[in-house]
Image (spheres, rainbow, N blue to C red):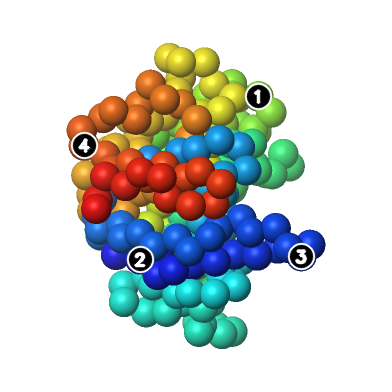
Amino acid sequence: MIEFKQVVKRYPGGLDALRHVSVFIPRGSITFLTGHSGAGKSTVLKLITLSEVATRGQVLVNDEDISLFRGDRIALHRRTIGSVFQDHKLLPDKTVEENVALPLVVAGMGNRDCARRARAALDKVGLLKLCRRFPQTLSAGEQQRVGIARAVVGRPDILLADEPTGNLDPELADEIMKLFFLFNQHDVTVIIATHDYRHLNNPAAGLLALENGQISGDSYS
């Protein structure tokens, strides 16, 4: 469960990225977050991961106010979240398997378990056969799938995606979206910030529309 209660996010210079946003996202749901550039979509995701902290209001995850987290508690919170980015953020000097295993390495998992979990994640996205390749040898769609495998390798409760299909053609974008719905079937709460309006009418997903830092539409209300 993720809940925003009258959340305001003000950046230096007086810009209000979010203005009194209140919204409830059920556990195990899949939600599209949409709106024009600058509407506040990325800010919502950053507040959930604690990359940013709300200026006012509360951000609750599983009934806990995460703005109160400090030190190791922040690190533990982030381990429950997988993040997918538009530009993949893959390390070019590491193999596909090493890129996927990186969150586990950072968490202190042993090498054998890291390799086993990374290969299992790659198998889920259909890329196990490419585990020894380097990112620059892959297509854009393959790189995005590697990014998704890395996001889910830690078996997160929440999966966040920021414009994950922005650089892909429609056919590849559809394949990527199918993966998000697949992981959602395993009780992962999925939030996708997107401009891809072709997917927004999916009856299996919720829809939150942001306009100038405020919720203008909410399928959960």
7 in relation to 118, above or below: below
The amino acid type found where label 2 is placed reads: Glu
55 in relation to 81, above or below: below
Give the residue drawn at x 41%, y 29%. 176
User: Which numbered dot is residue 3?
Assistant: 2
What's the distance in space between the residues labelled 1 and 3, CA to CA? 41 Å
Mark earlier in primary sequence (4, 3): 3
Mark earlier in primary sequence (1, 4): 1
x, y percentage for residue 90?
Answer: 65, 42
Give the residue drawn at x 35%, y 48%. 190
Q: Nearer the viewer, residue 161 or 143?
A: 161
Mark earlier in primary sequence (2, 3): 2
Per the image, the residue denoted by label 3 is 12
Give the residue drawn at x 52%, y 15%. 169
x, y percentage for residue 99?
Answer: 59, 46
The amino acid type found where label 1 is placed reads: Thr
Q: Nearer the viewer, mark 1 or mark 4?
A: 4
Q: Nearer the viewer, mark 1 or mark 2?
A: 2
